[in-house]
Amino acid sequence: MKDRRVQKTETRLRSALTSLIRERGAYDSIVVKEILARANVGRSTFYTHFRDKDELLASSIHEILSPARSEPLPALAQSYERILCFGLSMFEHLQQHRRQHACGGGVRMDSRSRDILHEHLQSVLVELIRKDVEQCLHTRRKTSGSVPASVLIQYVASAFILVLNWWVDTDSSLTPREVNDLFRALILPTLITTLEC
């Protein structure tokens, strides 16, 4: 467990970055100096916690995903459910931002910034999914098919980004639960036949 002061500092930094992204709609234009001013944190303190703003962004994504990943699975749940547990919480988080934008609570993000954010999101998902897939494979000892684990991991993360982009680009009226069901419908057959776990 992190010290409370460390947690508080990191929370302030994540919040500062999020608010700047929401106000500007452009991730590239944000510099560390602005994050420090918004969070009221010194430069040396920032670099004690994070290498750069990209690492701060990755930390923010981990923080969003943390509650869903810390919840225990139901007793009868298939082990592949751990691999997909991030979906609903991420769609719900993004829905909040969509609502805020619709109510005039921020600038629409430019496409380059969105691509950067989704690239970081995909990297974090690959990291998290890898642990779950490896655990599932360790339990089963092997995959049932010829799909390498690394391909499966990238496939799940990429499919999530694809569905996310479709949901945002089409301004779909699907609820977070419905769009998560769509994501699961695309992914589950592959997970079940490949992992058989």
Image (tube, helix red, strand yellow):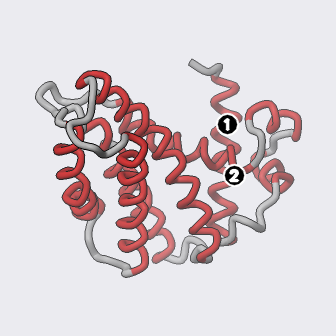
Q: Position of residue 11 (x, y in %)?
A: 63, 39
Mark 1 crowdedness (10 Å alpha carbons): few <14, some 14-19, many ≥20: many
Question: Going by the picture, which residue comes out furthest to the front?
Answer: 146
Q: Secondary structure at mark 2?
A: helix
* Type of the residue with mark 1: Glu
Q: Taking 66 as reference, is 177 left or right?
A: left
Residue appearing at x 63%, y 30% in the figure: 7
Given residues 51 and 151, the one toward you in this image is 151
Determine the image quadrant of residue 77: top left
Question: Going by the picture, which residue comes out furthest to the left?
Answer: 76
Rounded to the nearest angstrom, the CA distance separating label 2 from label 1 is 10 Å
Mark identifier at residue 16: 2
* Type of the residue with mark 2: Ala
Quadrant in the picture for the N terminus: top right
Q: Position of residue 30 (x, y in %)?
A: 77, 62
Mark 2 crowdedness (10 Å alpha carbons): few <14, some 14-19, many ≥20: some
Residue appearing at x 77%, y 68% in the figure: 29
Q: Is residue 31 above or below residue 172?
A: above
Q: Taking 159 as reference, is 78 left or right?
A: left
Given residues 107 and 179, the one toward you in this image is 179
Q: Is residue 12 above or below residue 19?
A: above
Residue appearing at x 52%, y 53% in the figure: 121
Q: Position of residue 9 (x, y in %)?
A: 71, 34
Label 2 with label 1: CB-CB less than 8 Å: no
Q: Is residue 107 visible?
A: no
Q: Taking 130 as reference, is 19 left or right?
A: right
Residue appearing at x 36%, y 33% in the figure: 132
Determine the image quadrant of residue 148: top left
Q: Is residue 49 visible?
A: yes
Residue under label 1? 10
Q: Secondary structure at mark 1?
A: helix
Mark identifier at residue 169: none
